[in-house]
Image: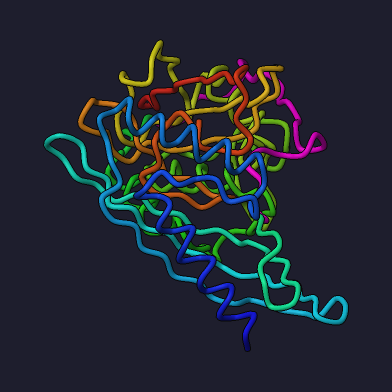
Amino acid sequence: MDWLVSLQEFIEEQNASFTTDRIRDSRISTLEREALIRRSKSLKARNAVIVNAQVKAKILHHDSTAPNKKEVTYLIKRSYLIKQPSNFYVEESLERRKALVENNEIELDQSLEQEGVFPSQLQTVERDEDVMPMPRYRYNRLEAVKYAERWWNSHNTAYKLFENDCTNFISQCLHAGGAPMRGYPNRSKGWWYRNNNWSYSWAVANTLRWHLSGSKQGLRGQEMASPEQLVPGDVICYDFNGDGRWQHNTIVVARDEQGMPLVNAHTHNSRMRFWDYTDSTAYTPEIRYKFFRIIDG
């Protein structure tokens, strides 16, 4: 299968570019090239360098769309060993991609993962200031981070897997840390998952952002002024377009040598990713962030 050899060579060439800054391949989208260039600049600004990059790929499906033309869907896992002046850490990602092959040569390669959500998912939630008192709890950050590390690249079958799974994943992490559910069965109240049903705040990025800032009991967040104030177990919310519609959430799992957050996330599954997402194709110069310290109830 000559097309498979071509795909393997293409993947290896792309992987090599992460350690050489040769990011000019026209076979990937302009958005991805721009994101990789921003990533390179971000690494330099942090005195960080990728000293080793490894990649594994698995073919999920391939189909001939015309004579000498093929569409290939594959899963790719990348691991980067990143060095700062006196610190090393490993960043990882897992994504589905699609390659278009013509005459056994790669013509186009693109990600099938979309960071952000569709407009239909941008529900808001009512403020719930009048709620029944709940037992007090202490948020266990270690357990939340352990869950984020265990499930960053896979699916816990105890929960539904969403097409845009970022907020569902963060909610699972928060619940693993002991944040109590409340509000069932009203989907616009509280924060909960039960009987294969869930509140908007459990699964919708925009709604979780407003829940964290407005909730008076149970899961609550305290807004912080800057990312370096966050610690493992805290949450970052992203408005990529700066239009007030919050599209993505991540959980802090560690901090780099400069004290900046490294995060785990779903949808484009990522581990130990630098917090600012300038390497995302969804990034725009108008991006806005909210930094939430998860507080005891």
Which of 32 and 124 lies nearest the eye of the viewer? 32
| Residue 114 located within the stretch drawn in magenta | yes
Q: Quadrant of the N terminus?
A: bottom right
Residue at 41%, 43% (x, y): give it: 21
Colouring = rainbow
Residue 88 image-quadrant placement: top left
Of all residues, the one furthest to the left in this rendering is 86
From the top left corner, tell me how far across and down residue 6 is, in percent.
58, 75
Of all residues, the one furthest to the right in this rendering is 66
Tell whether 213 sits left or right of 144: right
Q: Is residue 211 above or below residue 267?
A: above
Residue 246 image-quadrant placement: top right
Of all residues, the one furthest to the top in this rendering is 225
Q: Is residue 79 above or below residue 285?
A: below
Residue 105 image-quadrant placement: bottom right
From the top left corner, tell me how far across and down residue 33 is, in percent.
58, 42
Q: Is residue 47 above or below residue 199?
A: above
From the top left corner, tell me how far across and down residue 237 is, in percent.
53, 28
Magenta-highlighted residues: 112-135
Residue at 86%, 82% (x, y): give it: 67
Of all residues, the one furthest to the bottom in this rendering is 1
Q: How many marks?
A: 0
From the top left corner, tell me how far across and down residue 193 is, in percent.
60, 48
Which of 111 and 227 lies nearest the eye of the viewer? 111
Which of 204 and 28 lies nearest the eye of the viewer? 28
Residue at 69%, 78% (x, y): give it: 104
Q: Quadrant of the C terminus?
A: top left
Which of 131 and 15 lies nearest the eye of the viewer? 15
Tell whether 20 sits left or right of 154: left
Residue at 59%, 21% (x, y): give it: 287
